[in-house]
Amino acid sequence: MIRGVPARQSVVEIEYSKQVSDDVIFGLYKSKYGADYILVTDLEPAEARTVFPCVDEPAYKAVFRLQITTEDGLGVIANTPIVRKERAGAGRTTYTFQETPRMSTYLFFFAIGRFEETKLTVGGIDVITATRPGQAEDSQVALKISADSLLEFQSYYDVPYPLKKLHVVALPEYHTGAMENWGAISSRESYALVRDDTNFRLKNRGAMSIVHEVAHQWFGDLVTMKWWDDLWLNESFATLMGYKMTQKLHPDWEMWGVFLRDEVYLRSGAMTLDALSTTHPVQAHIKDVAEATHTFDSISYGKGACVLRMLEGYVGEEAFRKGVSDYLKKFSFSNAAGRDLWDALGGRSGLPVASMARAWLTRPGYPLVRVRVVGNKIELTQRPFLLSGDRTTGTWPIPIKIRADGKETSFILKRESARLNVAATTELLLNVGRTGFYVTLYDEAAYDLLASNFPRLSSHDRAGLMNDLYLLLQAGLVKPELFARFVSLCRSSPDPLTIQIVSEQLRTIEAIAPNSPIVQEVIRTFYPPLLEYFGEVPQPGEAPSVSTTREQLMSYFAELDDSYAEKMANLFGQYANLNPNLKAAAAIGFAVTNGARAEKTLQEMVITSQSELDRDILYRGLSAFRDPHLIENSLNLGLSGRVSRSDSRYSMIFAAHNPAARDTVWQWVKKNYDTMWKMYAGTQQFYIDIGAVIPICAVEHEADARRFLSGRRLKNGGSSVTRILEVLHIKASLRKRLLRSGN
Ligand SMILES: [Zn+2]
């Protein structure tokens, strides 16, 4: 509007209605439990348009005035508090909500259902958890961490929380983890309903995800990306902040180790996805929302967070915080792009942040740094790293941190190669502290030095070294024998984080090549001494990372070894009172040992359990059977309507890693692919789940998988499907190499 000219306003009224489908768990849907349901929205990236007429793009922010009329006795929750409640005739009530600030459509939220609420008021803001009836007691951890992190973020951002209240709504059926709707975070129950005595690994995952969504209330909600090509800006920042604040609130949780494990190294972590030829730049060119859907991956979350962490290290923590605060103040209630953040960080630090950021964010992939010791010099060369082993060219400005013979050296490797006048006769380590996003391949002499210094390496350095070796093994750049040599070093000098990472790597290797002699030998010698070292009984006051490691070792070994499974089966008798970190091993042991006789008990427990967290653990048992028919029953249970539809992923993901169940899972995935695709409404979560499953369960059926996923399925799944096929090919090639080794 130009000042002085009378505004000409037109008001358009649109009357519309929408039928809610029973089949989906996305958009406006029924999140069911028992005979009841919560009617709820989940709208990112582009479902708002299916709920009400709107210009459904993040840059078109609008003010929302919402009124909901519903039958008496139901609760209603939206982005803002209720300001008025009126009778609306026979058995109906109308709720009027406070007008929202300017906000993007994908953050709009409402839920109608029977809720139990728990409230905590901090700094004048009501923090409220809402659960279905009977679950409120389990929301105490979420309530406290939401309130604590809200206060922490207010002071970190130096910007007050922009709304009057913050809900965390736990949903019995939910397709993904959690969502940052402004003022009303929605979450799957297993993330929001964690208790103090919950299995530590699951408690930690849930709490961190709530903190991630609280971080978004400013970064993403108050200031939103202009378009989906900067989705990573929201997600990588919230990922970094989720870990940073959880670490601040719970220093003993060792969140930076969890960050490396879950976001960067393991399974489809950033260093795996970004080493595929089907990867994309963090800052991807997104032409439409369908494409945006496929960028909710660990490149946007994990790699983006690594690059931000690298930039934070480059400009310094305080300059980084002040730059972020400037950015939020400048673009409040509006939209911004990546370059606006670089300008703010550059403004506070006086450093060329934009050029460093551009180099890492606008091109896909990351470098392999090859190290050779030549006399009194170290020679470094870089080239792009691909898991397929293919060679391409290109360079990055890599912040290199080397420790050699007790001295640390830092510099930026800009060219393809460099020679340093640094002697490495007793010690050599690259990527010290593991803040660099690259993989290192040493020469034989340097690996010998690393082996002799292995017990003295820090936890993150050891974990990083094992991560690199596993990536290089998949790329065919190191031999299985070298990987096995370092696995045995991990075993002789155990560090909890490294053992968690290695046992997860071994579980995958075992799943794809159980008959490989070298794999059998590694597995046989890995678990027993470690189980002895960590003990099978939790000790009072032990570090959470120790509990997590013990849980992992016990449950994986129970899957592998019949006599150990039998021992674990003995624990099952006291299941209800068992330490939560021992329950998975007990359920697996019970299933492996008793087969069909265990099925009914485990299924009953899953069907009657009110806790998704408990079910998550029980499905471990249901997925461990040796008999394919029993596995098929477990898989069918997830889609039977007898359990929450959120459960459908559990048995599929767990059973894929069971060598006895692999083919059954593959046949089942083919049979139920279309049903699941429809249920997940084609969202990224579907591709994340089948992406975790197909490369393992179809490892001997590569051609069949290619055929199955061609045509319509490929078109619907876009880049996610080609990526799954590429990972499958890499796993199938690794399987062949492992089967040849040690013979
Ligand atoms: Zn997020």
Image (tube, helix red, strand yellow):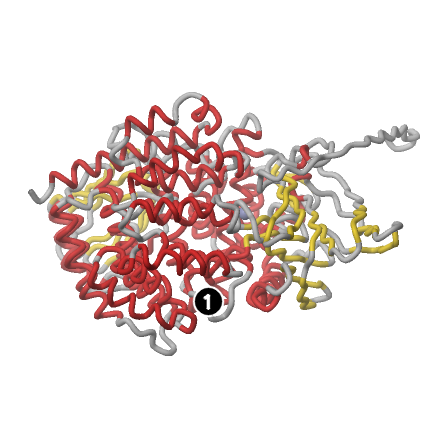
Q: As drawn, is 450 to the left or to the right of 355?
A: left
How many numbered discs sit on the rendered protein?
1
Residue 459 visible, this angle: no
- Left or right: where does residue 654 sit relative to residue 138? left
Picture residue at 74% right of the left edge, 58% below the top: 164
Can you say which quadrant of the picture contains the N terminus?
A: top right
Of all residues shown, which one is farthest toward the bottom?
540
Q: From the viewer's perspective, is 524 left or right of 53?
A: left
User: Which residue is depicted at the point 15% across and 49% down?
Assistant: 446
Q: Secondary structure at mark 1?
A: loop
Q: Amino acid at mark 1?
A: Thr
Query: Where is residue 252 drawn, in percent x and y?
Result: 42, 69
Query: Residue 656, located in which quarter of the rendered image?
Result: top left
Camera-side residue of 108 and 26: 26
> In this figure, which residue is indicated by the disc labeled 1?
198
Q: Residue furthest top?
A: 711
Who is closer to the viewer here, 51 or 158? 51
For ligand 1, tell me if the residue under mark 1 lies within 8 Å. Answer: no
Dividing the image into 4 quarters, which one contains the C terminus? top left
Residue at screen point 29% across, 39% down: 663
Judging depth in this view, the residue of 575 and 743 nearest the camera is 575
User: Residue at the left extreme?
Assistant: 743
Q: Position of residue 613 (x, y in %)?
A: 47, 59
Tell me which corner region of the image, top left, top right, bottom left or bottom right, holds residue 586.
bottom left
